Image (cartoon, grey):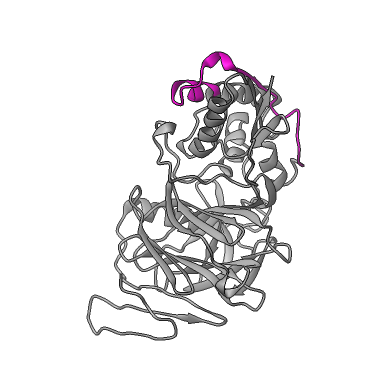
Amino acid sequence: MNRLRPRHILVLASCALALLVWSAPGHAGFADALKKKITDKATKKAEDAVDKTADKSKQAAPAEKTNEESDGKAEKSEAPASGGSGKVSAVSTKFDFVPGDKLILMDDFTQDELGEFPVHWKLAQGTFEVAEMDGQRWLRCTSDDGHVRMKLPPSLPEFWTLEFDAYGFDTGSYLMVYGLTKDGGSVWETSFPHGNGAMYIRCGDITSDTPLEGSPVQGRHHVMFLGRGTALKAYMDRERMANIPDVSAAGAPIEFDFRLWAPGMKVRPMITNVRFAEGPRPAKDMLATGKLVTYGIRFETGSDVVMPESAPVLRQVAGYMETNPTVKLQITGHTDNVGSAASNLDLSKRRAASVAKVLSDQFGVAADRFATDGKGDTQSVGSNAKPEGRAMNRRVEFSKF
């Protein structure tokens, strides 16, 4: 691997290739700049869609949806970008990301006006705006280079997860995420796409450069980080990209910096569905209290199809059932209140039944060890008036019976 050194610029005179290495105030960074003309039709369509909606009036409100469509939009904020159907049990065991269960921040930018800077974020550099593409809100960087940070509590929990969807990155544009100390120094930093589509991560003298095997560089990606004390894991789509046991050499991170870098590119990079949560805390008995509430079981938008990204949680449940052969579980689905009460109730019941079927058919747990039910939007644990509350309400619960 060709390692780039911070605060130096190497220029190779060529009409086709320029390699840029940058240095930002307070922390070092890295980037390639292999520029090319974008001809992909899907990218052009997305670019046109974003530009069209970004010019709308600031007072414009989203169009009213039908019950099924409204429920689908709400659920989308919990669904990873990689999406797709497929056999859940076939997902690599290296993909072990389980989202935290105590939500601290959830932002799909639906509470912000188009063209404005979002309320839950701090601007560090560049120009950003809330845009819309295919009916979904995004935070878009409109300058060649930009840094934004979430408004978070003054310290991070010991166990945490960060995940979001990213779009618009290709050769010549970059997504970079940093874990920063209170002095603005970099504890760890990541860059994608690095080289021919890898995620590069650096922590002091430790570096990792892992190619993204399962997805093309272009398009939409789901990015995840999992912090466990001093350990850090990074994921993209259904792949684990880095596993560093100790990142504490430079200190403890207190916030995250998102850098969207696309000099001269027509398609501007964007992020959405940002979710930061505490936990999940490792437990010897996942049902020690008699109930497991999880946000790690994901579904196709507006449907009961269990997504492959649900594999880590379902493996844990299946392992627990194998270790405790006399235990039987009640599986209960819950939704937010977007859409009609009847459609939410039906969807929650179907989703619970789908979870039981996957555990039986793909993980070998006897079907008679499960009972299923759905409560729709009748047992909220958060306010449906806010994205964070709606995200907390969309959940699956396991309980002993």
In the rendered image, residue 351, in percent from the top left (x then y), is placed at 57, 26
Q: Residue furthest top?
A: 368
Residue 108 visible to the viewer:
yes
Quadrant location, the N terminus: bottom left
**Residue 138, quarter of picture:** bottom right
State the image coordinates of residue 294 (x, y, percent, origin top left): 63, 37
Q: Nearer the viewer, residue 43 or 306?
A: 306
Q: Which residues are the magenta region? A: 356-382
Looking at the rendering, in which quadrant would you find the C terminus? top right
Of residues 81 and 205, the one nearer the viewer is 205
Say if the magenta span includes residue 228.
no
Task: Choose top left, top right, bottom left or bottom right for residue 35.
Answer: bottom left
Magenta residue check for 360: yes
Residue 112 x, y percent position in the rendering: 67, 56
Specify whether 121 is left or right of 304.
right
Q: Nearer the viewer, residue 243 or 183?
A: 243
- Classify 220 as above or below 284: below
Residue at the image position 55 percent from the left and 74 percent from the top: 186
Residue name at image x 47 percent, y 62 percent? 269
Where residue 307 sits in the image (x, y, percent)? 48, 35
Please tell me in which quadrant of the rendered image residue 27 appears.
bottom right
- Residue 127 appears in the figure: no
Q: Residue placed at 49% from the left, 45% from the top?
A: 96
Looking at the picture, does residue 356 appear above or below residue 270?
above
